[in-house]
Amino acid sequence: MSQGLYHHSLRAERLPLRINMATIAIVGAGMGGLSALNKLKQQHHQVHVFDKSRGSGGRLASKKVADVSWDMGAQFMRAHTQEFAQQLQHWQQQGWIERWSFDPWVIDAQGARPSADGVERYVGVSRMTALSRQLLQAADEFHASTRIVACQWQASGWWLQDEQQQSHGPYDALVLNLPPQQAQPLLDASPELQARCDVAMQPCWTLLLAFEQPLATPFDAAFVKQGPLGWIARNNSKPQRQPGETWVLQAQHGWSGQHLEHSKQHVTEALLQAFWSALQLAPQTPTEHWLHRWLYAISPQPLQRGALSDLPKRLTVCGDWCDRGAVEGAWLSGQQAANDLLTVLE
Ligand SMILES: Cc1cc2nc3c(=O)[nH]c(=O)nc-3n(C[C@H](O)[C@H](O)[C@H](O)COP(=O)(O)OP(=O)(O)OC[C@H]3O[C@@H](n4cnc5c(N)ncnc54)[C@H](O)[C@@H]3O)c2cc1C
């Protein structure tokens, strides 16, 4: 399917109006793209997935340093809708996710206290990315480490160009599952959708820590409502994680934005100080640590409209920011993107 761009014009046949077995490209192997993939495969279309990273999952990310690993992006999944609740149940039956049973605490100016909120939270086992790997199995081809830099709509269909100047296509339909800032440059063929990508995303500084001994704190996870931190969690309290004391610290989005260009050392020190203060423990030296800056972590005002589609061009754009800012929103958006395409493919 890869060939030089100059070959495109030689394949100028007209697309049929209905395609029973279409070849579809999905750019972005996060939850939105994987959701669309599985829906499209139910109708037996050929689906090729591209991602700039070495693996799948996107913000459903895990990080390994030496022999320690953490969930570096999404911490858990929860359902607000019946559809996603059913999907979680299905994945649980498959053994791909498990319930993470814990009572989150709240830490604010009044102190630390349990908040039995009754929410059912689920995690991929044995890490969040494990779920994405299962979902990716449905793909006919996965092009890892392939950053797409241009998408062209021609008479023969969609052509994708990667940063190595390789061309991929033609495809009968295209799904772009990317944060809006990364989707925008790929949408020259559809100025209307391009304009809809004007959606803000907030950043999140994330610090991962490992310790020799368990930290003496009564909770496994807490929502922090003061200072730089927003969330802290004992990663090894999740089911099927490897032994060893590991913590994930996420900064508040506002604080992350204000400190976006600060040095890693400054951010690490500020988050560590806030962590020990939240735990009311004397500082200890971690055995491993890793700091990550998520530039496009979450949308404060997602579009709440499922997906954005340009159906005459068999093009659809999805992702959490099109629906709601969570794994659930990404999954729902991917379903909508696939449903939109199916109306013009079948
Ligand atoms: C720190 C953090 C904590 C979070 N916590 C939670 C939580 O606890 N619960 C929850 O429900 N949600 C949480 N979220 C949000 C959740 O992770 C996202 O809503 C969801 O994973 C988004 O999925 P997506 O498919 O829309 O996008 P993404 O996962 O961002 O997927 C986009 C993919 O596109 C790829 N890509 C980008 N540009 C290109 C290109 N040019 N070419 C090829 N590939 C490209 C990327 O590599 C990525 O894999 C969190 C997010 C972050 C960052």
Image: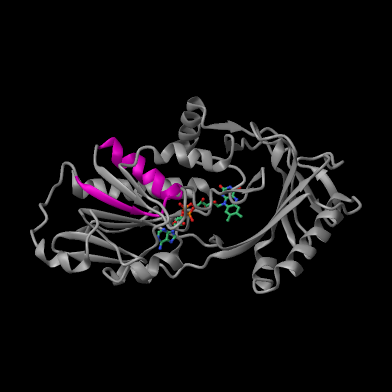
Magenta range? 22-43
Q: Nearer the viewer, residue 64 or 251?
A: 64
Q: Is 40 colored magenta in this rendering?
A: yes
Q: Is 219 colored magenta in this rendering?
A: no
Query: At which x and y percent is residue 5?
Result: 21, 67
Left or right of residue 2: residue 208: right
Q: How is the image coloured?
A: one colour
Q: Tell me which residue sits at (30%, 70%) in the image.
A: 192
Q: Nearer the viewer, residue 3 or 84?
A: 3
Query: At which x and y percent is residue 218?
Result: 84, 39
Spot the residue most to the right. 282
Query: At which x and y percent is residue 306?
Result: 39, 52
Q: Tell me which residue sits at (67%, 66%) in the image.
A: 256
Left or right of residue 16: residue 40: right
Q: Nearer the viewer, residue 320 or 156?
A: 156
Based on the displayed image, in which of its 4 quarters is residue 139 positioned?
Answer: top left
Q: Nearer the viewer, residue 32 or 133?
A: 133
Q: Is residue 232 visible?
A: yes
Q: Is residue 77 visible?
A: no
Q: Tell me which residue sits at (87%, 41%) in the image.
A: 216
Q: In which quadrant is the C terminus drawn?
A: top left
Left or right of residue 249: residue 76: left
